[in-house]
Image (tube, rainbow, N blue to C red):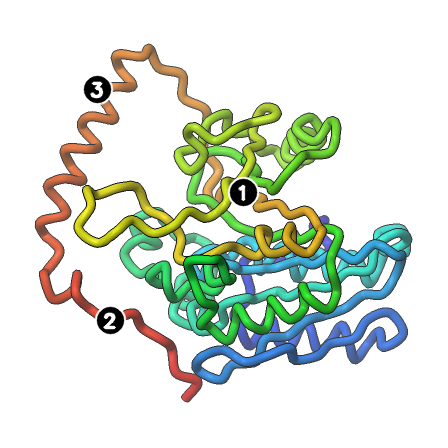
Amino acid sequence: MADYIDVRPPTLAELDRALHALADEHPDRCSLRTIGRSRAGRPLRMLTVPGGPVPVLVHGTPHANEPIGMASALALARIAVACPAVRERVTWHLVACGDPDGVALNEHLWSTGWDLSVVGYHGGMHRPAVGHQPEWGFPTPHYAMRLPETRALKAQIDALRPALTISMHNSDSAGAFYMTTGTQPPGLPELLAHLAGRQGLPVTQMPMDCIELPSPGNGVFVMPQPSAPAPTGTAEREWTPAGASSIHYTERRGGWGVFPEVPMWATDRLDLPAPAAVEILDDAARTADRLQYTVPEATARSRPRCASTG
């Protein structure tokens, strides 16, 4: 694996050069094409590595502040091109960056190295508002698709009818976990735990994102269908996406989907007695409560940014 993955995530320019190099050097094994453009006019590229009869779609960087998926998608592209066994049963379609405008606002965090601290990351990170996230822009009965990035990926799902869509997310810390659609194949939790363990990653048993979700096994959770928005004026409730995700839409087209969530930072397991853990969480909640009042009102009302190509 070390021969195929870089020491840090690529910038947009580096990613584009790497994908073009694969296509130019191995025209008999892969092809690269532009499947759409972002709101700021940046190209969305898809590298196809023909092989077996099973179509698999890989969606890298579904969220702009999650570059591990982009690095992993590029590594997977290199592996698929280099290793015949990887493409024996599968034809790979890899969209290594699904939100180039958002990544353009974040790549300064890793462009000069990968010694990023937790404080530095959260101090300079851009996360688009939910209605501006291509991953959560697929149509539902309650939401009309608006973003060109979402439209481009939807067109590929319609055309390819992937048996599997892998939307490559990353969490901040702790271990790996997985969110899936529908009914899971037998033995999936054990397989995914084995794959995480090969990379030295623990499996998170109950991540914050998955509380109360059904789980067929350790670290694997079933993604709920998008719900209707709360009526205006109702009591505050938990965050909900704007529309459906790429794996929801894949399921509608007869496929299966998974969100691998892997950590950006490795962390050691900490075993605490329950009272001590509650005390730490209460202290964190009090700190967060104080900090929310330090955010200027103008910042809270600011419009989402969209990085220009100029």
Find residue 109 and report its image quarter: bottom left
Image disc number at residue 303? 2
Q: Secondary structure at mark 2?
A: loop
- Mark 2 and mark 1 lie on one chain; the one further toward the N terminus is 1
Residue 244 located left or right of residue 237: right
Q: Is residue 94 left or right of residue 109?
A: right
Q: Nearer the viewer, mark 2 or mark 1?
A: 2
Residue 198 horizontal/vertical position (percent)? 68, 34
Location of residue 248 with respect to 34 vertically, above or below: above
- Left/right of residue 73 with respect to residue 115 in the rendered view: right
Residue situated in front as seen by the camera: 151 or 73: 151
**Which is more N-terminal, label 2 or label 3?**
3
Q: Answer yes or no: is residue 110 visible.
A: no
Query: As displayed, is residue 262 above or below residue 129?
Result: above
Disc ID at residue 155 = none
Which residue occupies 31% across, 61% down? Answer: 124
- Residue drawn 70% across and 31% down? 188
Q: Classify 10 Å Cα crowding around label 3: few (below 14), some (14-19), many (20 and above).
A: few
Which quarter of the image is occupied by the C terminus? bottom left
Q: Quadrant of residue 7?
A: bottom right
Q: Secondary structure at mark 1?
A: strand
Q: Which residue is mark 1?
A: 262
Q: What residue is shown at x 67% (from left), y 33% (from top)?
A: 192
The residue under label 3 is 279
Marks 2 and 1 sit apart, C-alpha to C-alpha, by: 30 Å
- Is residue 253 shown above or below 174? below
Q: In the rendered structure, which amino acid carries the disc numbered 3?
A: Glu
Q: Nearer the viewer, residue 57 or 4?
A: 57
Give the mark nearer the N terminus: 1 vs 3: 1
